Amino acid sequence: LEGVAPIAVNQFQFGPWSPESSYQTFEHCRRTNVVVTAYNSLGSYTHKNLTHDFEVLKELGKKHDKSVAQILLRWAIQLQAVVIPGTGNPDHMKENLEVYSFELDPEDMTSIQLLRSEDVSGKFIIMDLNDLH
């Protein structure tokens, strides 16, 4: 469209347990240079404790000496998503900033992405992008 600013950012729920439609949207945004801002990347306020049900996240936390939240944030950042973890807790703010002190290796990234196939993963999705059509 002439005279209209291009879309620069797309914000949607995105985490390892996101449905295929979210991954497709994420990849489309990357191909078209649209920044993705991932919200609820820690599972949302009401579901964040479920993240501790994933053994792979606990194992990666031990491997890197980081919390499950830090592992999830780092995963999204390494995919080049912008994350917006909300907290008013100074300890959590400090912990969130520590995600830049380590990197996940390719095997770690893959093991996190495979979480979509877990039975509990459907509990995290507030809205599937396919429902918008």
Image (spheres, rainbow, N blue to C red):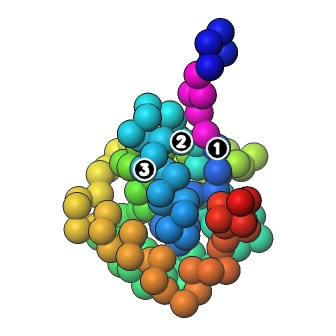
Image height of 7 relative to 120, above or below:
above
Q: Secondary structure at mark 2?
A: strand
Mark 3–mark 1 distance (CA, rounded to whole Å): 13 Å
Could you tell me residue 45's position as x and y percent? 74, 64
Q: Is residue 65 left or right of residue 88?
A: left
Q: Residue flagged by tag 1: what amino acid is it? A: Gln
Q: Is residue 45 left or right of residue 60?
A: right
Q: Quadrant of residue 101?
A: top left
Main SS class of the magenta portion in the image = loop
Q: Residue furthest front?
A: 1
Could you tell me residue 130's position as x and y percent? 65, 65
Q: Residue flagged by tag 3: what amino acid is it? A: Glu
Q: Which residue is mark 1?
A: 11
Q: Earlier in the sequence, mark 3 or mark 1?
A: 1
Seen at 49% across and 86% down, the residue is 118
Q: Which mark is residue 33?
A: none
Can residue 62 be seen from the camera position used here?
A: no
Q: Residue furthest bottom?
A: 119
Image height of 13 relative to 131, above or below:
above
Q: Which residue is mark 3?
A: 27
Could you classify mark 1 by the number of other residues whose Cα lies within 10 Å: few (under 14), some (14-19), or many (20 or more)? some
Mark 3–mark 2 distance (CA, rounded to whole Å): 10 Å
Seen at 57% across and 75% down, the residue is 51
Q: Secondary structure at mark 1?
A: strand
Image height of 66 relative to 26, above or below:
below
Could you classify mark 2 by the number of other residues whose Cα lies within 10 Å: few (under 14), some (14-19), or many (20 or more)? many
Span highlighted in magenta in the image: 6-10
Which of the pair 98/45 is nearer the observer?
A: 45
| Marks 2 and 1 close (CB-CB < 8 Å) | yes
Seen at 51% across and 35% down, the residue is 35
Image height of 35 relative to 14, above or below:
above
Q: Which mark is residue 36?
A: 2
